[in-house]
Amino acid sequence: AQRVTQPEKLLSVFKGAPVELKCNYSYSGSPELFWYVQYSRQRLQLLLRHISRESIKGFTADLNKGETSFHLKKPFAQEEDSAMYYCALSDAGGYQKVTFGTGTKLQVIP
Amino acid sequence: GAGVSQSPRYKVAKRGQDVALRCDPISGHVSLFWYQQALGQGPEFLTYFQNEAQLDKSGLPSDRFFAERPEGSVSTLKIQRTQQEDSAVYLCASTLGGIAGYEQYFGPGTRLTVT
């Protein structure tokens, strides 16, 4: 069974500090990994996916198949980064059923 | 263009009542998903449609839950004889294609409270 684990429910950092949101997964096939974000009073939206290898709003995430991790990183946190972040996984070879983690709330302290 | 819309946004039901939740996906999107998000949890998959075909309903928690998408666009999630454990936010998402890697576009959700 596929599973996504986000060990931190809440992560508080000061503005300008580095951010790392942890995500580990278990999956026997070839996974697609995503980070979704939900800002206050907004709908859930895609932040980035590993296949595109892009940096969005200064965030990056590297898929480490050896450690089965997909941690989200940003070198300097901004107040507008405060939001709920969900790591998610789907099967690369199949359709898009997505398994989400329980989410980490990022709080950036001014 | 318009995004995914859901109605109602909030629904209060007494235990035992039936409810129907509606999802209007983005026009032209082939795939449609329903998720259930309990308080403090991530969204959990309920069911998936490709056009009008329901290809996966493995996430539906009981036979009280039923979903349909008869014309391949609007979808309805119906819950019969609601129970308190059904209280959650129900999210709908749509995507352009059926293969993995496409971005899922989410609706605002329907918050169901069963009293």
Image (cartoon, rainbow, N blue to C red):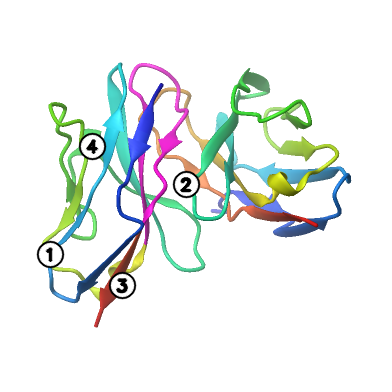
The 10 Å Cα crowd at callout 4, few under 14, some 14 to 19, many 20 or more, is: some
Q: Element at badge 4? A: helix
- Residue A25 image-quadrant placement: top left
Decide which of tag 1 and tag 3 comes sooner along the chain.
1
Query: Which label belongs to residue A50?
Result: 4
Q: Position of residue A107 (x, y in %)?
A: 31, 70
Decide which of tag 1 and tag 4 comes sooner along the chain.
1
Q: Is there a contact, CB below 8 Å, between mark 2 and mark 3? A: no
Point out the image quarter for the N terminus of chain A.
Answer: top left
User: Circle 3 sits on which residue?
Assistant: A80
The CA distance from mark 2 to mark 4 is 20 Å
Chain at numbered mark 2? B
Query: Which label belongs to residue A18?
Result: 1
Q: Is residue A86 magenta?
A: yes
Chain at numbered mark 3? A
The 10 Å Cα crowd at callout 3, few under 14, some 14 to 19, many 20 or more, is: few
Decide which of tag 4 and tag 3 comes sooner along the chain.
4
* Image position of B94 with respect to A91: above or below: below
Q: Position of residue B40 (x, y in %)?
A: 50, 55
Q: Residue at x 15, y 31 (%)?
A: A67
The CA distance from mark 1 to mark 2 is 25 Å
Q: Amino acid at mark 4?
A: His
